Image (cartoon, helix red, strand yellow):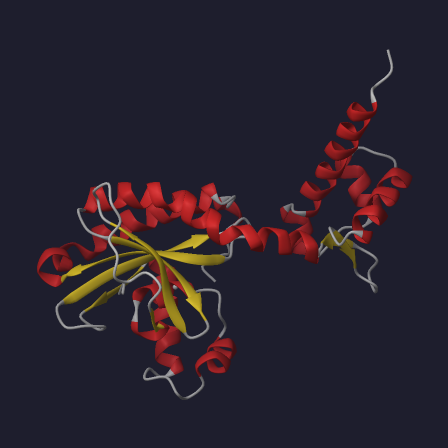
Amino acid sequence: MTDTPSAVRGHGLRRDIDLLEALASDEAQRAGGLGVVRLAQLVGREKSQISRALKALAAEGIVERDPDTLEYRLGWRLFSLVARTSESRLVRVAEPVMHALSADLEETSHLCVLSDREVLTLLSVSGHSFRVHGWEGRGVPAWRLSAGRVLLADATPDELYVRFGTASEMPVPELWALIQEARRRGYAQVSEEFEEGLVGVSAPVRDFRGRVVAALNISAPASRLGGRLDEAGRTTARAAARVSVLLGWAPRAAPPGRNMPV
């Protein structure tokens, strides 16, 4: 019995997915790409088949070939498709985790992202079955918040100078030190630095590449949360890790220790 045309197309799609998974592997990420020979070894197919498939994928922008090394890597179009859906997916997968986090700590949680020099709140929820509005859509200078220190975790000192220059209220070396402290802990915390009487903790949410794309934050009056900031930080970090896994992050692939809501 011969395969139907739809079955043949299905086999071809499966083989293309195998190639894309190989190009997304730790080995490919470390090397910056893989050649046809190595890809053939990884997926168990003939080099000529691999070469034809890669040319077709490259023509559509799904993969791209380095003109110097001739090795292949994941392409611009694939990342563009992911980027278009990542924010809505981020909110969708984070919300139930945030409800559980808020119920656990009995405080409001926030989902934050970085927008140029500011932290923007995408979603706020309480431990109850309703959203808490007020911070959503509002931007606050990143250096003032624990969320900002988490969201800037992947930045280098040079990138911080480019982003903030000398206009920041906080000198870049001081901001860099706070970012490094947050990375070592796994979460950032502030105590009445943003606003008198207000404390907060934030932890990083990572995407499938291991990059920090958002922060989970808990903010509350110091009278309620001030005495348990470390506990809240660890709890928030565990919740952020759950969201990261739902976004495709593999903990073993996280970048080595080298992120409103305050």
Residue 226 screen position, x and y as percent: 14, 60
**In this orientation, does residue 161 appear?**
yes
Residue 16 screen position, x and y as percent: 75, 38
Q: Residue furthest top?
A: 1
Task: Using the image, determine if residue 239 lies above or below residue 119.
Answer: above
Residue 114 screen position, x and y as percent: 43, 66
Q: Is residue 254 left or right of residue 229?
A: right
**In this orientation, does residue 152 appear?**
no
Task: Using the image, determine if residue 31 lies above or below residue 152.
Answer: above
Q: Residue at x 32, y 84 (%)?
A: 169
Task: Using the image, determine if residue 1 lies above or below residue 162.
Answer: above
Q: Residue furthest bottom?
A: 166
Q: Is residue 22 left or right of residue 163?
A: right
Quadrant housing the C terminus: bottom left
Quadrant housing the N terminus: top right
Residue 242 sits in which quadrant? Answer: top left
In-front residue for pair 136/52: 136
Q: Residue furthest right?
A: 48
Residue 4 screen position, x and y as percent: 83, 20
In-front residue for pair 261/26: 261
Q: Is residue 209 left or right of residue 14?
A: left
Residue 223 sits in which quadrant? Answer: bottom left
Q: Is residue 107 left or right of residue 260?
A: left
Q: How many marks?
A: 0
Q: Residue at x 63, y 56 (%)?
A: 80
Task: Using the image, determine if residue 249 lies above or below residue 65.
Answer: above
Residue 49 sits in which quadrant? Answer: top right
